[in-house]
Image (cartoon, rainbow, N blue to C red):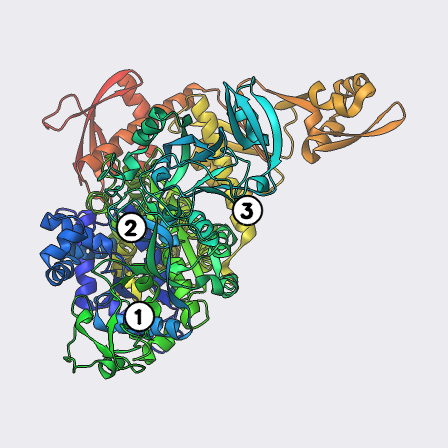
Amino acid sequence: MEKETMQQREQRIRLFWTASNIFEKSIKNRQESTPFVFYEGPPTANGLPHVGHALGRTVKDVVARYKTMQGFLVERKAGWDTHGLPVELGVEKQLGISGKQEIESYGIGQFVEKCKESVFTYEKIWRAFTEELGYWVDLDSPYLTLSNEYIESVWNILSKVHQDKLLYKGHRVSPYCPSCQTSLSSHEVAQGYKDVKDLSATVKFKRTDCNEFFLGWTTTPWTLPANVALAMHSDLTYVKAEQNGETYIVAKSLVSKILDSEAKIISEHKGIEFEGVAYHPPFNYVKIEKGHIVVMADYVTETSGTGIVHIAPAYGEDDYRTVTQNDLSFVNVVNQQGRYTEAVSDLAGQFVKDCDVEIIKLLANSNLLFHKEKNEHSYPYCWRCDSPLLYYANDSWFIKMSSLKTKLLENNATVTWYPEHIKEGRFGNFLENVVDWNISRNRYWGTPLNVWICTSCGHEEAPESIEKLKSLAMKSLPENLELHKPYIDEVIFSCPVCQDEMKRTSEVIDVWFDSGSMPFAQHHYPFELEAFKKQFPADVVIEGIDQTRGFFYSLLAVSALYTGRAPYKNVLSLGHVLDEHGQKMSKSKGNALDPLELMHDYGADALRWALLVDSSPWNPKRFSTKIVQEAKSKFLDTLENTFSFYHLYASIDGYKFNSTLPGKQTKMDEWMLSRLHSTIDKVTTFMDDYQFTQSSREIAKLIDDVSNWYIRRSRQRFWASGFSEDKRAAFNTLHEVLSTVCKLLAPFTPFIAEHIYMQLHDESVHLQDYPKPNKVVINDSLEQEMKDVVKIVELGRSIRNAESLKVKQPLAEMVICSNGHFDAYQSIIQDELNVKKIHWTENLAGLADVSLKLNFKTAGAVFGKHVNDLKKYVENISLNEKETLISEGKLEVQLSGQSFKLDKTHVLTETHVKDGYTLAKEGTLTVLLCTQLTRELIDEGYIRDFIRCIQDNRKKFKYPIEQYIDLHILCTSECQELIVKFIKLIKASVLVQDIVFVSTFDSQHVIKYELDKNSLEFTMNLK
């Protein structure tokens, strides 16, 4: 039967989970347990999942599975973010229309229905991605932000915000996307900054009363047609300076940067002296009643520009406030598409951000351009459509988050953040500078803002429920009333104050308010109470770092508005997944990895393990296909091979685990069980602190020890004939290790853990408890001893590699210098390194000698004039003093009647090893390997390589490992003599029963081999 692939296995296991309701059982089994509350941030299903989603979903699943196995009730409700501009833009593209005018021509009702249809365009792909990844979350009953129940809960929150007088409408400058034709909130803007090079201009503004020019500076030349004022700081010092026959006014401290060295300073003035001075605007497109004068503003600085700032009230918050405070005219020459209006006759209809060059040309033609240059700066782009934003004066609805700043900071103080620096850094700084939330959007597909306004007296009503909506409506409403636009706009109230009509304000709300409402709205709170009470606040929220000012903030903000409490206890902020060169992944660059393809090629476990073990999830992660490939080959395949070894020999011997038959444990078994339980202890400690990378690395080290040490050193026990107490102990130990490792791994790599555990126990590992360490079997000193033994073996191998001596080649002797006692492990070391004899010593006298020389670079500064005396002292140092200095790292010496401390850094050491030996050292361990080869050793080396050839061919011909073979050999008399000499070794190593020397072969399966430069042929026959 052909072996199933990793992908076939994972599919089989997914089908098993579904058929047996394993996910549902894992929750049902904990119904009476303490809840561990987990919130799923809602993705939008009208886009494809990427590797960043794979990281987020993997970490979420690891936490949820781990806490479930620890005994908690972890309910996992999926959610879909269904509203907003990404959906609208997708539908516009699908319909071949663009912009609000074309949407309204198409019909708002039809457009909204199309949006509703398109929301789940990629839902099947998301579901397949989620299921293939092994992420257990309830996809069959998710919360949907478009549902009436969800919207009703959001309305309830907004109604409270309105009642608390925190919701208001204001005309102010807000970030605005001309492509989407709607404003954005400050936390949305924070997600879309790019470093760009834009033109800046220094412009000549001529005074009306004399032939002098204010030099005004702007980084947005496109705003100059709407200039209303110039701003200066009242306390800054300005100068009038003459250059090339013209007089300019600039900040004194910036003269050297702006004017030529030949410029002549005429006079100095405080900024206040220019207050009210009139000037001619650079353009005369718009006539204004009040403006084109100098005003004072505290935000003007002398750190850049000219110290004089151009003011255009419609395109900057400071500008708008300054014009309002000085009662100047308001001017706007840009329409909602971000294009100049007819007022700007030279550039009408052009997108303003594309007009900087044209504006500068017009200034130059009028001799009003003093200087231009390109400035690199950070500029906001729309996080949805990637268009450059404008700061634009609009009527918008705001929530007074600034009044809740203290509460937000207090609530954040109760939260544990991973990584910790985000709490007071990126997130804390954002809260410190929190501004009012621009909650409204002039769009169509979203939760309608539930504010009705009287057309006569301006009275406002914000219904908190559908029942309240029905009670206020002038006409009876249908039971299945659609709460979206345009249907909700048809609902008219009767004003309780003046009895006139009340109509709903036309806006929908920011989708981030939808997301931030999910702790309440997912359970239809407060209309349904039971589920919510058990599920608030969250124990953990897990999303990417880009959600710091998105989902994380909106959750905190909405909860502060609604309950005054923090909505979560722990926040896991995951770093971006970058390509292998550290660049952001994108399809346009061709460096994006498709998580579905990675799972199809290497399996979900490999992808999950690669995302976790490679680097901490908090950091930006360089990621590539190679990392996933290595996760499979180096870890998962090692675990698979370890289990295959166990399964093969358990099948041969008919072994069944029986806890009442412990067998006779060896020191190797005791060490293995100690390693197992100390790993459980470490993994649990790390996992309780959400340290997934450290946890996975501990498990990886354990698997490596099982495969490359325990099984390597225990093979003969499994191979032994019969079923001794020793063999039973080996099987029992490996059975316990594999069973427990499956439980340890179940949250990380759920498929292979299930695959192995089912074969060991015929039960799902995901219905088991997470293992707890048995402190009784943990033996730290035994683990340290074995670690030192492994290090001794590694040092021996390093010598063999350096001397090009294969392990098959026996060596005569190894000398080990150590303070420890490793006699009990001598046979292990001998077998691993293929040495005939080991000699233990506490010093290397007669084999290696260390000579010392003074290191003048380090000693000179310390010993000064005594350095030459020290040199002589070191050259004649006694053996005991030398050993003290080397072992303890320091030595007290007397020079010219004074006491000095000599330490290791003051000397250079050189080791001289006895001929025929090679030395290797690490820490307190030193080994010498005798590398001289006798004829006897060389001959044995040839035979051991011949044994390797026989073993390789046994595997090639797929001979059962427990069956004996006969060898028929055709070779020279010299070869025959050599083989006969080592016949016992051959028979013991490869289960050979008879070796027959022949003069010819009948068989076609003749294997050719060269033994000690002599040609040899042999065949193998099963007994």
Q: Which residue type does callout 2 highlight?
A: Ala
The residue at which mark 2 appears reads as: 54
Residue located at (43% from left, 42% from top): 292
Dot 2 falls on a residue whose secondary structure is: helix
- Residue closest to the far front: 209
Q: Secondary structure at mark 1?
A: helix
Disc 2 crowd, CA 10 A, few/some/many (<14, 14-19, 20+): many
Determine contact: label 2, label 1, CB under 8 Å. no
Residue wearing tag 1: 154
Residue at image point 24% right, 57% down: 84
Q: SS at mark 3?
A: loop
User: Picture coordinates of residue 419 (x, y %)?
Assistant: 47, 51
Q: Label 3 amino acid? A: Asp
Foreground label between 3 and 2: 3
Residue 406: image location, x then y, percent: 52, 64
- Amino acid carrying label 1: it is Val
- Nearest the eye: 655 or 759: 759
Disc 3/disc 2 C-alpha distance (Å):
48 Å
Mark yes or no: residue 826 visible.
no
